[in-house]
Image (cartoon, rainbow, N blue to C red):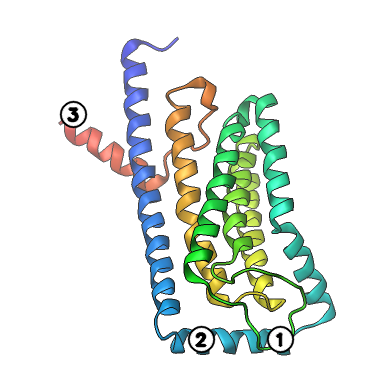
Amino acid sequence: MRTDTEKKDATTQSAKFITWNLVIGLLLAFGAFHLFMEILEAVHGNGSQIAHVDQSILLWLHAHQRHGFTEAAELMAFLGSPIWVVSLGVVSAIAGFFVRKIRGAAWTLPIGIVGAGIIIQLIKTEVHRVRPTLFVPLLKETGYSFPSGHSLIAMVVYGLIGYFLMHLLKGRVSKAVVGTLTALLIVAIGVSRSYVGVHYPSDVLAGWAAGFPWLVTCLGLHEILSRRYAQAGEPVLEKAPPIAQAVCNATDKKQAA
């Protein structure tokens, strides 16, 4: 059994770990938000430069359409569709009620899904960007183009599912594989939206950039609340990254001296 001093030290290290991860997360979220605002300003402005880039990429993708690529893009469109993503999120949230290690999924996923939906609708109704008309799209979509809802909601929901799934696995390799596959899936879903011709590449990039800060917010809430309330679930980020841990150790040594 740990002594009171050991418990105090563990609490202190946990607090430092939370602080460092919050700082890193906030910096990344701020960078993503800044990128989104830059894209939004370019789209809202004269848009000539970003329109040229968008059209060039769309025409290149259209010229390289192949049967196998098209089938893969259609599969990604399904995996990123709101009905599938929300259904998957609901199932994962329900699983959180029965699996203690992912208890946090029971409340973070519903919050993530609702928040993502609100963000998508607010931006779409504000920007009013029409969908590409350079060529006949492979899929039929309605509504405004900016940002890509598939990209945004995929970032949030698949990001949260990958986050909790890594907590169920043991070993750095398996967790790294899950993290990599999650990132690749999110990227593939976004790229497929431009491939099938229903979104400009800037729509996709804006979807990722707008979704990432909300994902970080959901992850941060879980990490903080799970360390204070057992009902909120278990923390997933159990160990500090090497750089943060090294700084914490150096700070401890300096204070001890």
Q: Position of residue 15 (x, y in %)?
A: 34, 31
Q: Which secondary structure lies at badge 1? A: helix
The residue located at (32%, 23%) in the rendering is: 9
Residue where numbered disc 3 is placed = 256
Q: Is residue 141 left or right of residue 230?
A: right
The residue located at (76%, 60%) in the rendering is: 78
User: Is the residue marked by circle 2 packed among few (<14), some (14-19), or many (20+) residues within 10 Å?
Assistant: some
> Which of the two discs, 2 and 1, labels the residue nearer the N terminus?
2
Residue 233 is drawn in which quadrant?
A: top right
Q: Quadrant of the N terminus?
A: top left
Q: Which secondary structure lies at badge 3? A: helix
User: Disc 1 to disc 3, how far (Cα)?
Assistant: 63 Å
> Which of the two discs, 2 and 3, labels the residue nearer the N terminus?
2
Q: Nearer the viewer, mark 2 or mark 1?
A: 2
User: Is the residue marked by circle 3 packed among few (<14), some (14-19), or many (20+) residues within 10 Å?
Assistant: few
Q: Nearer the viewer, residue 183 or 40?
A: 40
Q: What amino acid is at disc 1?
A: His
User: Disc 2 to disc 1, how far (Cα)?
Assistant: 16 Å
- Identify whether 251 is placed above or below 24: above
Q: What amino acid is at disc 2?
A: Ala
User: Is the residue marked by circle 1 packed among few (<14), some (14-19), or many (20+) residues within 10 Å?
Assistant: some
Marker disc for residue 51? 2
Spot the residue most to the right: 67
Residue where numbered disc 1 is placed = 62
Q: Nearer the viewer, residue 119 or 65?
A: 119
Q: Position of residue 74 (x, y in %)?
A: 78, 68
